[in-house]
Image (cartoon, rainbow, N blue to C red):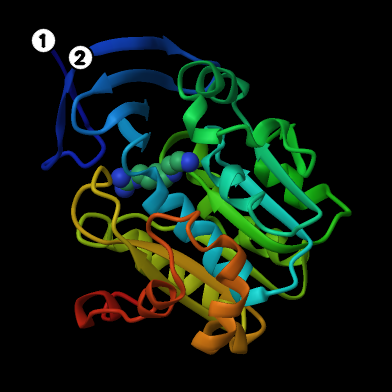
Amino acid sequence: MMQYLETLHGPYGQYFAVERELYRDKTEYQDLVIFENQTFGKVLALDGAVQTTTADNHAYHEMLLHPPLLAHGQAKRVLIIGGGDGGSLREAVKHPIERAVMVEIDPAVIELSQRYLPELSDGAFSNPKAEVVIADGCRYVAETEERFDVIVVDSTDPIGPGAVLFTSDFYRDCKRCLTPGGVLVTQHGVPRLQPDELTDGYRKLTALFADATFYLTVVPTYTGGAMTLGWASDEPALRRVPLETLEERFAPLDGKTRYYNPSVHQAAFALPPEVQRLL
Ligand code: AG3
């Protein structure tokens, strides 16, 4: 049986027994492989880093989308940067929003995810609220005239085509695209293995936003323990929405999530001292 060995972290990694390889090729931007594994179902990896699996992606996509959307409470427009597999879009369209725009640089990720991992997007690409733009996310936020209540950066790690999505210039442009009281959420890796990414991200986000912090989720195939998601807004109250308010807003989604609930949402903002120290 073939094995897939993740190379993302150098001195430490994970292997998967490949039951069946579904696709392997170089897209215009990155090496892409999709395979089946007995424990995690279908697995999508880009440039030697696992991006998503059918078995644990909900812990990532639900926590990227529901905390900002439910904390905001009145979001109409959502912007997703990256996220070609459609998992973030899937969670976005569960909300009573008007529009979710997903800007993905690599059309092959979208096409191949739709073909081999349709359960990731679960129909979201044909949802009337969804719009897909094939473009460089950096350029999009620098140029668009549209404003969004929530911006979610569903990026790869800060190597390769995703690296620009961790720069101050990009965050500044995201801020420009936010409505007043809007919130930006980012994926910031696993602090046990990528501590500099967190420290660097905190420095950049606090320089631009009145309130910046990180919150946690646990995605087994993002090895190394809890991962951090960045939270940046000029409205500090968004971080402290009372549990009862979140519960009310969550009621229509109750039963439709596997990881998120309002208590998990609130608890996710509690950071262990070893993570706090990196900020
Ligand atoms: N984006 C997050 C990849 C993070 C993986 N990094 C890691 N293991 N440190 C995945 C895209 C899913 N929509």
Rendered image: mark on residue 19: 2
Q: Amino acid at mark 1?
A: Met
* Lateral position of residue 165 relative to residue 172, left or right: left
Which residue is label 1 attached to?
Answer: 1
**Residue appearing at x 55%, y 58% in the figure:** 65
Q: Quadrant of the N terminus?
A: top left
In the rendered view, tell whether residue 57 sits above or below residue 207.
Answer: above
- Residue 30 visible to the viewer: yes
Rendered image: mark on residue 162: none
Image quadrant, ligand 1: top left
Q: Amino acid at mark 2?
A: Glu
Give the x, y percent position of residue 233. Answer: 62, 76
* Lateral position of residue 58 relative to residue 88, left or right: left
Within the image, what quadrant is residue 84 found in? top right
In the rendered view, tell whether residue 244 sits above or below residue 132.
Answer: below
In the rendered view, tell whether residue 174 sits above or below residue 242.
Answer: above
In the rendered view, tell whether residue 261 sits above or below residue 103.
Answer: below
Q: Secondary structure at mark 1?
A: loop
**Residue appearing at x 55%, y 40% in the figure:** 83
Q: Secondary structure at mark 2?
A: loop
Q: Nearer the viewer, residue 58 or 33?
A: 58
Q: Are marks 2 and 1 in contact (CB under 8 Å)?
A: yes
Q: Nearer the viewer, residue 146 or 176?
A: 146
Give the x, y percent position of residue 27. Answer: 51, 15
CA gap, disc 2 to disc 1? 7 Å
Name the N-terminal-most of marks 2 and 1.
Answer: 1
Q: Is mark 1 within 8 Å of ligand 1?
A: no
* Lateral position of residue 178 relative to residue 94, left or right: right
- Residue 158 visible to the viewer: no
Give the x, y percent position of residue 53. Answer: 35, 35
Within the image, what quadrant is residue 241 found in? bottom right
Q: Assess disc 1: are there few (<14), some (14-19) or many (≥20) residues with their C-alpha within 10 Å of its C-alpha.
A: few
